[in-house]
Image (cartoon, coloured by chain):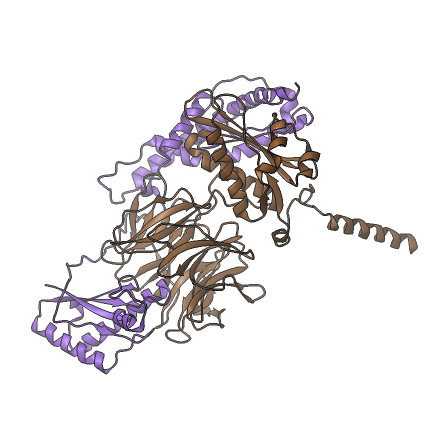
Amino acid sequence: LEDVNLIKPLNLKEVLMIKIKNTRHSNLYFGTVMFLGFLLLWGCSKNVAPPEVEEPPAPVVEAIPEPESEVEIDLTQEEVDRIQESDETGFGGGIETSGPEAIDEIDVVEVAPEPESEPELEPIPEFSPETEQFEETVVEAVEAPPVMDMQDDIFVAPEAEPVQEARVLPDFKDEQQLQDVHFEYDRDKLDSSTKTILRANAEWLKKNPNARVEIQGHSDERGTNNYNLGLGERRALQTKKFMVNLGIDESRLYTISYGEEKPFCFDSNENCWWENRRAHFTVAD
Amino acid sequence: MYPKNKSILIVALVGLALWLQPYPTYSEESIFLDLVKTTQNKVNIAVPQFVSSGGGVDESFSEKSRNILENDLRLFELFVPVAPGIYSELAKSEAQVEQVNFGAWSKLGAQWLIKGQYEKAISGEDKYKFVFRLYDVVNEQFLVGKRYQGKKSFMRKIMHRFADEVMEQLTGKRGVAETRLAFLSRTRDGKEMHAVDFDGANVQKLTDEKSVILSPDWSPDGRFIVYTSYKEHNPDLILLDPDGRRRRRPLLRLPGINSAPAWSPDGSKISLVLSKDSNSEIYVLNRWRKLTRLTRHFNIDTSPTWSPDGKKIAFTSDRSGTGRPQIYIMDAVSGDRTGVKRITFQSRYNDNPSWSPDGDKIAFTSMVKGKFQIKIYNTETRKTTDVTTGPGSKEEPTWSPDGQFLAYRLTRGRKPSIHIKRVGGGKSRQLTFLPEGGVSPTWSPYPKR
């Protein structure tokens, strides 16, 4: 019979402690909200990052929970000690107020094993599950996890330096007249047959002075992705350099490396690998 | 002299006795088990059926929950779940969770015992409450108790969290059942990113990229994944919010490569590879978008990874021979200007360095007999050891946040998938089973709790 009752007194005590905790929290909670509100206003006024039209700015309500959870955790630790110390004094505040404290989807409560034998190790609630507000907050957190406003994030271009300019590239298409060139395994050197092909490609470019060319560097499937990406880049750059030396205006030549990501041939043999270790030309007018 | 010696002897004997204790996991001063020892001495743990403590009874749901918890413990490879059939009678006889016949459990071979209760919350339709108590049966001791409450859909997360709690009781280090891994899988148009729980369940698609994407890295605060995408016809750096609305934002779109990003351990910087100035060089991008160039070499430099103190960066370079990439360490501020230290010598092809959370190990990919294997370089002993051997090619290692596991890409035949292996453990386990395969894993940090 005693065992049956083990949990119930626990809950009562917990409720008591939650109330204590909540009273202690209320001031801090208010302060935190004010602080966050200030931060938000400050952030909004300063941040002139390029607006994304389709994304409305995150409402204040959404922004609050996240930092709050940190406050919550810190506080809980302090509370743990304080409550443990003052447990016997019987705080009976009974104040019902409580903020939307718990942000975590899961509410975690320490449970004591045999509360009657170890009264000083009473369960210490980390959150306050019994209050209405808490439950609402949890539901919110579950259904719509707090969305961080990326505009406020660290990786946002400051006002003085707007989002980095990217190249606006034309639509490059394959051109029958321009041949691929191939490379030795793990090399970016151009051999004599490669150079013959590149000279022919350069002649075509001279006859078509409006054409702009993208040189794609590729590798075979062997090797690691990161290294192959670098290798493809070097193949494209070597090819470009040779073309420039043949008198092609550098501004007409773009390079891009695909590493091993866009194979031409899908088998695992030397013929196929040779096909894939290539610099490929595409053209736009 | 004699009494003095005697007292020393007594102290020594007591010390020896403590040291030789057959089961020293619980002693209050140090509950921390030596992980190396534990791998040879796993804990037999019983996880009997959860008991309904009121509200509705949902046995299939509670059994599903129990299986997730028990499986997590098994996957840690430090626990051996006792077969439920062995203790089902005993479990039934102990209708009350608080009631534990330690002697009886011990006789059945259980060393630890988890008693679980569940309850459908009175208010709210979809909420469940779980109460767990963990007992050390051998020493007749209560170790920890937790109560969780959440929506039904959070059941998996709750089971994972308590499994991690149990792990923490054993090793002093939180378990990783609640962590997730992101990885890439091949599609017709390129690749897409998915995330999966540590136990291989709960696969979610994170991107709708429809183009080649590369080298994801999960931020230390868990809020972002940064990766490279060809969506805008250039390998650009993209920031993704993997939860919430999954917003995607270009971070850096410099001409040429913007790839192989690696968050600094404090999350304030990203080291990455750019080819805007030359061929592939390593830079650091700070929170104000200022770039610092770290390498200056006409050969390829790539794959940066930070030491956990943020002071050093290990990276790959073929500066000692074109086509023969090796792994080096440099200063994270001054770069290769102040010198580099080469750490790999055994193979002609090494890449993908990944610095362990504890800082004393660097896992990497190494070519052995035409295939890749995962190896570990110990920064203290300067010795290199094998993590994987045998058939198949293994690449792209990533550490679990507790430093106990490595996940990597394994390719056998044509289709790669992600595998997880306990460092110093036995067999690896296949984590991903998507028909599109799995490559380039990145392990999430610990979620907040």
Q: Nearer the viewer, residue A142 or B87?
A: B87
**Identity of the residue drawn at 15% across and 77% down:** A247
Give above or below for A237 relative to B26: below
Which residue does the image show at 62% across and 22% down from the upper left? A6
Can residue B288 be seen here? The reply is no
Q: From where the camera sits, is residue B218 visible?
A: yes
Q: Quadrant of the N terminus of chain B?
A: bottom right
- Which residue is situated farthest in the left direction here? A207
Residue situated furthest bottom in the rendering: A192
Q: Nearer the viewer, residue B338 or A261?
A: A261
Residue displayed at 18% across by 57% down: A168
Q: Position of residue B196 (x, y in %)?
A: 40, 46
Determine which quarter of the picture holds residue B45.
top right
For residue A195, what is the image quadrant?
A: bottom left
- Which residue is painted at 47% across and 65% down in the image? B329
Name the colour assigned to chain A in the rendering: purple
Q: Position of residue B64 (x, y in %)?
A: 47, 35
Q: Against B128, is B80 above or below?
A: below
Location of residue B381 with respect to B20 vertically, above or below: below
Query: What is the number of callouts on the image?
Result: 0
Q: Nearer the viewer, residue B15 or B119?
A: B119
Percent across and percent down for residue B217 are 39, 53
Chain in brown, by letter, is B
Give the side of residue B192 with respect to residue A104, left or right.
left
Relative horizontal placement of residue A159, taking residue B392 as reference (left or right)? left
Q: Nearer the viewer, residue B305 or B88?
A: B88
List x then y, in percent, for residue A78.
57, 33
